[in-house]
Image: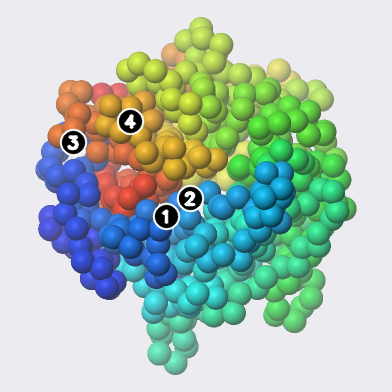
Amino acid sequence: MIVKFFTHNSILRTLGTLTTCVLLTGCVGPFRDSTNAWFIDASDFPPEICDSQPSEDDSLKCDRSEKDVIAGDVNNDGTIDFIVARKRYLSQRDCAFNHDPEACAAGLSNTTSNVNKRSARLILNEAGALRDRTADFTNWLSSSEHMTSRDVALADFNNDGYLDVVFAPTASELPRIYLNRGINPASSVWRGFSTTAIVPAIPSRVGEFSKLFCAVTTGDIDGDGDTDIFLSNYRPGLGTADVLLTNQFNDLGTGSVRFNDESIARLGERRNSAFGTASRIIDIDGDGDQDIVKISTLYNVAPWNRNTTAVLFNNGSGMFNSFYALPDREQYMFDIGYYNADNCLDIYEVTDGNDYLSLGRMTDSGMVFDTAIQLDRPSLVTSVGTGNRSDGLGGNIKHVTRDNTYLSNSIERCTNRNIEMPTAMIERNKIAAIIGVAPIDVEFPQTSCSRTASTRPAADMVLFRNLTDNDMWRDALGTGEALLVGVAGPGGTPEDTDGREVWEDLAHDFEIVDINRDGRLDIFMPLCTGYKVLEGVRLDFSASD
């Protein structure tokens, strides 16, 4: 184990020393060295990432922004780094950008107000110590670079072997792409991110368009060898359209990165959205091209005409003419992975009430998704103890596989089990082994973060183990079922003094990764106030104990 990161009283304190803030105590629970635990709290003090502009309350010491996080090795040093997208909770009511009727009647229009904007943060993993390197390798602290970002993604847009970053802002802002400058060949020192953002042109279309992006995902949808961008859009009370930006890097042949808005040409009315909260570019049917999965929720728009998680199938040339729409469940977030043991990907949906796991299946007419039968129950009620998992609020969901990756190895072709492979079972390492669900609702984060100790237990972050990953359970369940159980501490004993497990906290988002390269999964959690890091103790999350 690289002990620099997980040594008591040095954990994450290094992150705070690079800011001007004074470190606080009492923001997280006490450290406990328990070899029987799943995780131990390794964050004596949260990294204090203070707003670089006046906040609503100048006395705030910990970062209380709305946050989303993405993990990746941005400087190619073999360790996992983090980029945090930040904004003020919600956005002020505004006639111009969200067409709020009451705001229009009152003449409210303050889309350029900096009070809603925050700087993104770059947190580098340096030999196991997390450090805030925003000021050293970006210009994001400059007020001109502040954004109302609600999501962030990493991808290599210019095929140079380094991860670039794209932010999805709301409040009438356009997405921003910062290219990775790579290593300086003379000094062998990483040069950070470009100080000039690429801002794709997205034309406004009367009657349908707003720029209130809530999610961003990347992938090569047209098969030309460069990475494209899909943005989920929303417009309160009215319909709008998501945006598909195709990367012209390989087509131009000039070494420049440029994006074209091809939403209408490639998606048609399938670009339509109400409240688009989540999306993912992924080859969901395993046929070799990249499909799009997206959510449209809160109210009905064509062609879905209901709240849905819609699967848009790529025809092989980057055109999306057919789709499968899951049932109306007031969906907010989703995860895609192998939840049972067959070779078709599945969809876990986080909703305002019960969560649902829909298992993928190939038919003669195409791929469909059946609501999973969980021990003879028609839907998966993800609860620990009593009450629904989300307690009326839904947040980000992510999983990792048995070998500590997301969708490890390659995606398999989803086959019709009745024709080609009646007993097809995939490798254990591809099955979702541990699943996390954050509690903070993207629509009302301030409501989620105001939970008190008495109302929080049903609204904290939860972890699930997928027993389908265990050989004994997989053999018993067969290929058509999955079984998720809540993760508990050793013998059911809570790891925190307040009666909750260490991960049961008010997290906006999280990443489950091996931070210190010891082969164990760790968790980085941006909280309502500050941050938390949990050290993984166990090597095998699929163990049957």
Q: Secondary structure at mark 3?
A: loop
N-terminal of the pair, mark 1 or mark 4, is 1
Question: Residue under circle 1?
Answer: 65
Query: What's under tag 4, amino acid-wise?
Result: Arg
Q: Position of residue 123 (x, y in %)?
A: 37, 65
Question: Distance between the Cα atoms at labels 4 and 2?
Answer: 19 Å
Instruction: Determine crowd level at label 4: few under 14, some 14-19, many 20+ residues with C-alpha closer than 10 A.
Output: some
**Residue contact at pointers 3 and 2, CB within 8 angstroms:** no
Say whether residue 490 is left or right of residue 380: left
Going from N to C along the chain, the mark reached first, 4 or 3, is: 4
Could you say which disc has been placed on residue 89 in the image? 2
Q: Quadrant of the C terminus?
A: top left
Q: If the image is split into quadrants, where does the N terminus sit?
A: bottom left
Q: Amino acid at mark 3?
A: Asp
Q: Amino acid at mark 2?
A: Tyr
**Of callouts 3 and 2, the N-terminal one:** 2
- CA distance for labels 1 and 4: 19 Å
Q: CA distance from mark 1 to mark 3?
A: 25 Å
Label 2 element class: loop
- Label 2 neighbourhood size at 10 Å, few (<14), some (14-19), many (20+)? many
Question: Relative to residue 487, is residue 54 depicted above or below?
Answer: below
Q: Amino acid at mark 1?
A: Ser
Q: CA distance from mark 2 to mark 1?
A: 7 Å
Q: Is residue 484 left or right of residue 515?
A: right
Please name the residue shown 29% across and 71% down the image: 19
Q: Which mark is residue 456?
A: 4
Residue 283 seen in this snapshot? no
Q: Which residue is mark 3?
A: 496
